[in-house]
Image (cartoon, rainbow, N blue to C red):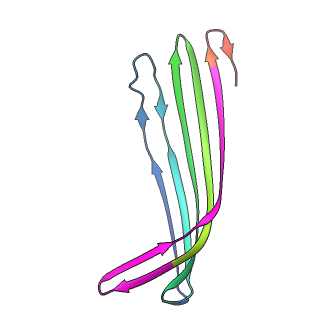
């Protein structure tokens, strides 16, 4: 429908523990997204997506613990072509944009302390 708009959002969380002998760690990826689109015609829309992913992991060995954390943010936009054939709707979209990733590592234990 020309002129109509839609929005969507979501969040996810995954818990996974390390099973490597001698190492203990927990990975907790968390992610969110927000998407919006405006239909220009029945067959064409302009859409944008933004999202974030956050995670951390910790490994211990010999009294020393290393912890890493990271995050990635994406900003995307582009066209969407959509159609309908009987009761089935279909679409395809091509998004371009940027992603920004950052990470940090800290080490502690056995006389070592680094924030």
Residue at 42% across, 84% down: 83
Extreme-right residue of the structure: 114
Q: Where residue 115 sits in the image (x, y, percent)?
A: 70, 25
The answer to whether 39 is drawn above or below residue 97 in the figure is below
Q: Is residue 89 rendered magenta in the image? A: yes
Q: Which residues are magenta?
A: 81-107
Residue drawn where x is 55% and y is 36% of the image: 56
Query: Within the image, what quadrant is residue 38 found in?
Result: bottom right
Which percent across, then down, holds residue 32?
53, 55
Residue 109 sits above or below residue 91 on the image: above
Please tell me which residue is depicted at 60% across the width and 36% down the height of the picture: 69
Report if residue 77 lies within the magenta region: no
Residue at left offset 64%, top offset 29%? 105
Q: Main secondary structure of the magenta part?
A: strand
Q: Is residue 115 above or below residue 22?
A: below
Residue 23 location (% of width, % of height) = 46, 20
- Which of the pair 106/90 is nearer the observer? 90
Whether residue 35 is situated above or below residue 90 in the rendered picture? above
């Amino acid at each position: 429908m020309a002129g109509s708009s839609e929005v969507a959002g979501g969040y996810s969380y995954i818990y996974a523990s390390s099973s490597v002998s001698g190492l203990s760690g927990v990975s907790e990826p968390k992610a969110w997204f927000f998407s919006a689109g405006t239909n220009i015609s029945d067959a064409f829309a302009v859409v944008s997506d933004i999202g974030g992913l956050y995670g951390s992991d910790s490994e211990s060995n010999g009294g020393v613990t290393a912890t890493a954390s990271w995050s990635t943010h994406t900003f995307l936009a582009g066209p969407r072509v959509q159609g309908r054939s009987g009761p089935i709707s279909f679409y395809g979209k091509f998004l371009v944009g940027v992603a920004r990733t950052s990470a940090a590592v800290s080490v502690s234990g056995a006389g070592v302390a680094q924030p």
